[in-house]
Image (tube, coloured by chain):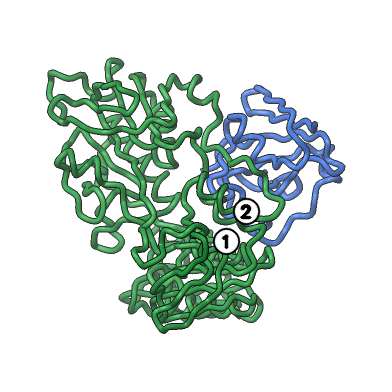
Chain colours: A green, B blue
Amino acid sequence: MPTPAHPAPGHPGGHVVVVGNGQAGMQLIDSLRAGGYAGAITVFGEEPHAPYQRPPLSKDYLAAGADPEPLPLRAARFFLEHDVDARHGVAVTAVDRHARTVAAADGTTLRYTTLVLATGARNRPLAVPGSGLAGIHGLRTLDDAERVHAHLGRAANVVVIGAGFIGLEFAAAAAARGANVTVLEYGPRPLGRAVSATMSGHIAAAHVRDGIDLRLGDGIAAFVGTDGHVTAAVAGSGAEYPADLVMVGVGVLPRTELALAAGLEVDNGIVVDGALRTSDPNIFALGDCANFPQPRLGARARLESVQNATDQARHAAAAILGETGEYDELPWFWSHQGTLKLQIAGLSQPGDGTVLRGDPATGKFSVFCFRDGRLAAVESVNAPADHMAARRALAAGRTLDPDQAADPTFDFKAWSRDPAPAAV
Amino acid sequence: MSTITFHHGDGAVDTLDVAPGTSVMRAAVSNGVRGIVGECGGQAMCATCHVYVRPGYLAVLPEIGDDEDEMLDCTADPRDPRRSRLGCQVTLGEGLDTLEVDVPGSQV
């Protein structure tokens, strides 16, 4: 708890300092003001842009006629109307927990009553020979996306390293623009850590149908180039794929350097408790950078998603305003890959039993994942009604029989809405 | 330019001039119109840009797609069978130079 020498958070004399102006940081500010917080708020973001939405950057933004303006997270007037000192393009360089100050790259030092670390993640770098050649991109920031968008229009041969969400979204977008696309995935299946083997198989088949050369079980060994620009990707198997554009999507690393330097507990992210407090009670961490207790798994988790960022921000804002309670929101995700609109409710795990609902041949179906006899997750393709019904059911802790899930005559949507289902 | 007017439940009104091709969601989010969230960034994946289109404009709206139709069944405020749309799926211009919508009380 804050010591009496400092004004309590929520007190008009308080000062909440937010490091990071992404989805988590911006929602936290929004929720603090909506909850009546009247103290000072300062938000730092190291990118030289007003806060923007990242998800479209690997999807709609890559289309040929896309609007070049990113979608803002909040309008410029938000900061005026909510009395927020927004410092875009200014990184925080150090945290002094004893003095309760942050030092920023603009030379200022600010005192905080509550510090919120919403520092996000950075792309995991590749360390294979040739990784520094021009034409090899990552995709996380607006600057990345602008570079990629400009390059994509003149790329004939595209190689994607990693069949995760970013890799597959990009592969679909590049194929839609007419490029020859090869995806190299070291693991045995696409989205291996994110979806069930059943769903993974359907996604792989869909991308292959759309003309993408999906190479599973073969990682990247090296890039070769001419005049400093990449010309080919060499796989671990020795196969060589011509490339004038390479997208590297091999996961992210949480941005923990400030927390580490400040002596906070860090272990695959900044370690927080159920209130999203770090090992220092005056400091919260949330979003991509936070390792939090996930009651639905009975384990710790670190999730990279809009839902995780915004729901944790709402929870942390409430905690700063004095509410108690453990964070326990249902995780959900989406990904848009060519003709596939993938939506996931809950977290599937290796070993879950799966039941198919709908016919994948129609392009519209869901995979229901059961663990210990209970519904644990639902993965949907082009079936938003299943997804929304699954979110309702899972959030309420309800389960159904696997036979019901597979039965096309069972009205899952109506069942999910029925507050007191009759015994079957 | 196209003109879109957002009517709020408390009687407040936001009127915006936007470039043709701008979606109702983008217009609202870019200009800080309260009550329109757009959490998924315009993918018809979150149903947080729900609006009620005023009756005079219904005839010139684009058809509701399958995804939009299913997501509209899951809005925070109840769906109006005729007037409910997702703001990310309605784009100004192309015969829709003016539009008036009512903003629901809640989106999340």
Give residue A184's position: percent from left, percent from top: 47, 74
Work out whether mark 1 precedes mark 2 in sequence or the reverse, and give the earlier one. 2
- Residue situated in front as seen by the camera: B71 or A86: A86
Q: Is residue B79 left or right of residue A21?
A: right
Give residue B58's position: percent from left, percent from top: 82, 44
Label 2 amino acid? Asp
Q: Is residue A140 left or right of residue A313?
A: right
On what subunit does the disc labeled 2 rest?
A: A
Identify the residue under disc 2: A60
Identify the residue under disc 1: A336
Label 1 amino acid? His
Q: Residues within 10 Å of mark 1 (few under 14, many from 20)?
A: many
Q: Is residue A201 above or below residue A174?
A: below
- For marks 1 and 2, give the CA distance: 9 Å
Q: Element at badge 2?
A: helix
Q: Residue at x 66, y 59 (%)?
A: A154
| CB contact under 8 Å: marks 1 and 2 | yes
- Residue situated in front as seen by the camera: A265 or A128: A128
Tell me if residue A424 can be seen. no
Tell me if residue A236 can be seen. yes
Q: Residue at x 37, y 37 (%)?
A: A20
Of circles 1 and 2, which is in front?
2
Q: Residue at x 50, y 34 (%)?
A: A49
Q: Is residue A52 above or below residue A266?
A: above
Q: Residue at x 44, y 62 (%)?
A: A249
**Quarter occupied by residue A9:** top left
Q: Is residue B14 above or below residue A304?
A: above
Q: Element at badge 1?
A: strand
On what subunit does the disc labeled 1 rest?
A: A
